[in-house]
Image: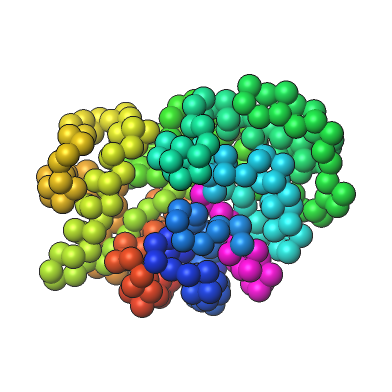
Amino acid sequence: MNGLGILLPFRACGAKDAVRLGLEAERLGYSSVWTPEVSTFDAISVAAALAATTEQISVGTAIVPLDSRTPVSLAMSAASLSDLAPGRVTLGIGVSTRTIMEQWHGRDFGRPLSRAKDTLAIINEVLEGNRTNLAGVVHSSVGFRLDVVPSERPKVFLAALGEGMRKLALEDADGMILNFLPRSKAQGLLQNQSPSKPFVIACFVRVAVADARGASETRIRKEMASYLRIEQYRNWIASFGFGGLSYAPDEDLSSVARRLPSEFVEDVAILGNAEECREKLSKLAELGIVPIVVPSIAAGDLESYRGLMNVLAR
């Protein structure tokens, strides 16, 4: 297997197509396939379909908003997935964004670190086969225990940007998932992590094979600009010394995308010919980071997704 993970399309892609692409990723030799959850399909349902129909590839969720389900529900989902694919399952969770949680799901977004800490504590208790007994700051669970504990414990990864969330992941999770990590800063970030147990650091990496018209870079720039609307991402990017990337609420997204510094775009995304893209992904993996490829394609363009998936697998 090629050591790469790949994120299934998260816009304008139905569950059936997502499963087909996941099966193709296994045939191509990808090491892991990750099911996102934004506003298309339910990540756990698609992960379950893949867990039941694949044989070798690892299956993970990336990212399930942790407050979209109760901690016990998340633990039961992870246990069910692990029963379908023992030793191949990772539950990737994260606090998500204020818009998604408060406006879409109608849930409180406050105290994100406490939410994540309570959720991990309950999930870990359940997956160990213990009876829950936690009165947390945000979440509580008393007296729940799985009737059937999976033969192999699924891994639990936490999406982590801020220092506090990364510290929590090191203490209570099996791995962390990063996003928009400048490759020039990756080694320095790794040196500041000191896990006392086996631990995985994975990272979403937006990849586009360059085209003559520059459409691939334009899409990457627009996606980066859209994330800069979110405070967590602005703070994360600023922590690496990239300042001045915010914009006024009424400023046009395309305008922001165009003025993003080229050195920033090239450091965070992978853009080039097929060989250059594969080489950059390999260098990231050599540092000890698992790249989760996020193909930069137009929403719903599954043929372009499939094409990029094939190119990078060679």
Q: In the image, what residue occupies the spot 76% across and 36% down?
A: 125
Q: Which colour scheme is used?
A: rainbow
Q: Does the rendering let one see residue 25? A: no
Is 52 part of what is drawn in magenta?
Answer: yes
Please state the extent of the stretch shown in magenta in the rendering: 46-63
Left/right of residue 77 with respect to residue 255 in the rendered view = right
Report x, y in % for residue 76.
Answer: 73, 49
Residue 40 location (% of width, % of height): 46, 61
Q: Quadrant of residue 239?
A: top left
Residue 135's spot in the image, x, y percent?
A: 72, 23
Side (left or right) of 105 relative to 252: right
The quadrant the C terminus occupies is: bottom left
Instruction: Give the residue drawn at x 61%, y 57%.
Output: 44
User: Can residue 269 be seen from the camera position used here?
Assistant: yes
User: Going by the picture, which residue comes out furthest to the right?
Assistant: 147
Please tell me how many numbered marks the rendered image carries.
0
In terms of depth relative to the viewer, which is nearer, 43 or 105? Answer: 105
**Magenta stretch contains residue 69:** no
Tell me the quarter of the image containing the N terminus: bottom right
Q: From the top left corner, tell me how far across and down residue 197 is, in percent.
A: 65, 36
Looking at the picture, tell me which residue is in the foreground, 1 or 97.
Answer: 97
Residue located at (21% from left, 36% from top): 249
Identity of the residue drawn at 37% across and 53% down = 205
